[in-house]
């Protein structure tokens, strides 16, 4: 069946294209979802109008994506997580965690599917994660994963001084129990 695409459909074509697809796919999915209409004799004229409208919309979306990409490329996400001595996390930092943190920090609406993370992050350290805003616009976000509960290093005159932690020191604590009289 020949159809005229009203919107971009992944794997089929762009808005305004006339494509041949399986009858069931067109009748049961594309046409009811408003993604396409059945092709007719006036489809060529209608195709041109739809394509021009789609190009204008794509230009606006690309402009918005480019400004969002500038904002996102400057973002550094800092996660604290429990980790073993081998620097392997007990849990993981997922695409959903990164998307939520990006929304909170940048104010932009980011879906977890836009975070191009092959596997959840399971190691301490600095990771570069691409965010797919649209085709051809993928800013890199820096994700820093640090050990939870580790003291922060102190920076003095551009020199990093590690805090001193002594595990051998014993601390005495006095506890006084007060009972309520009823």
Image: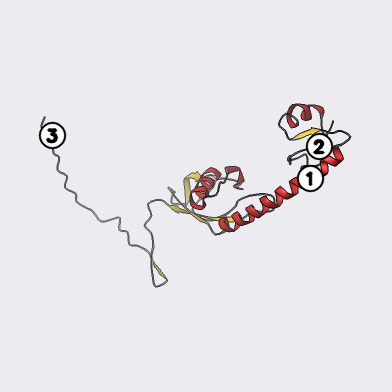
Question: SS for tag 2?
Answer: strand
Q: Earlier in the sequence, mark 2 or mark 3?
A: 2
Residue that numbered label 2 is attached to: 4
Foreground disc of the pair 3, 1 = 1
Q: Which of the pair 149/70 is nearer the observer?
A: 70
> Within 10 angstroms of label 2, few (less than 14), some, or many (20 or more) residues?
many
| Vertical order, 169 against 157 (above or below) | above
> Within 10 angstroms of label 1, few (less than 14), some, or many (20 or more) residues?
some
| Circle number at residue 180 | 3
Residue at image point 82% right, 41% down: 47
Residue that numbered label 1 is attached to: 51
Question: SS for tag 3?
Answer: loop
In the rendered image, residue 74, in percent from the top left (x then y), is placed at: 54, 59
Q: Earlier in the sequence, mark 1 or mark 2?
A: 2
Q: Mark 1 and mark 2: span between their CA atoms?
A: 10 Å
Q: Which of the pair 170/102 is nearer the observer?
A: 102
Q: How many marks?
A: 3
Q: Earlier in the sequence, mark 3 or mark 1?
A: 1
Kindly indicate whether the residue at mark 2 contacts the one at mark 1 (C-beta within 8 angstroms).
no
State the residue lying farthest toward the right. 41
Tell me where residue 15 sits by quadrant: top right
In the rendered image, residue 66, in percent from the top left (x then y), is placed at: 64, 56
Left or right of residue 55, residue 19 in this image: right
């Amino acid at each position: 069946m020949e159809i005229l695409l009203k919107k971009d459909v992944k794997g089929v074509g762009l808005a305004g294209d006339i494509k041949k697809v399986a009858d069931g796919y067109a009748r049961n999915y594309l046409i009811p979802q408003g993604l396409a209409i059945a092709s007719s004799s006036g489809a060529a004229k209608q195709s041109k109008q739809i394509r021009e409208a789609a190009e204008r919309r794509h230009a606006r979306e690309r402009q918005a994506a480019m400004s969002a990409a500038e904002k996102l490329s400057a973002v550094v996400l800092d996660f604290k997580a429990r980790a073993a001595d081998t620097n392997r996390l007990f849990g993981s930092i997922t695409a959903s965690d990164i998307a939520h943190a990006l929304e909170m920090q940048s104010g932009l609406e980011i879906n977890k599917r836009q975070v191009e993370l092959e596997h959840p992050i399971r190691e301490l350290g600095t990771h570069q994660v691409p965010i797919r805003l649209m085709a051809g616009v993928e800013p890199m976000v820096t994700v820093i994963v640090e050990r939870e509960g580790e003291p922060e290093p102190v920076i003095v005159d551009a020199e990093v001084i590690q805090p001193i932690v002594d595990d051998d020191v014993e601390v005495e604590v006095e506890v006084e129990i007060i009972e309520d009289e009823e």
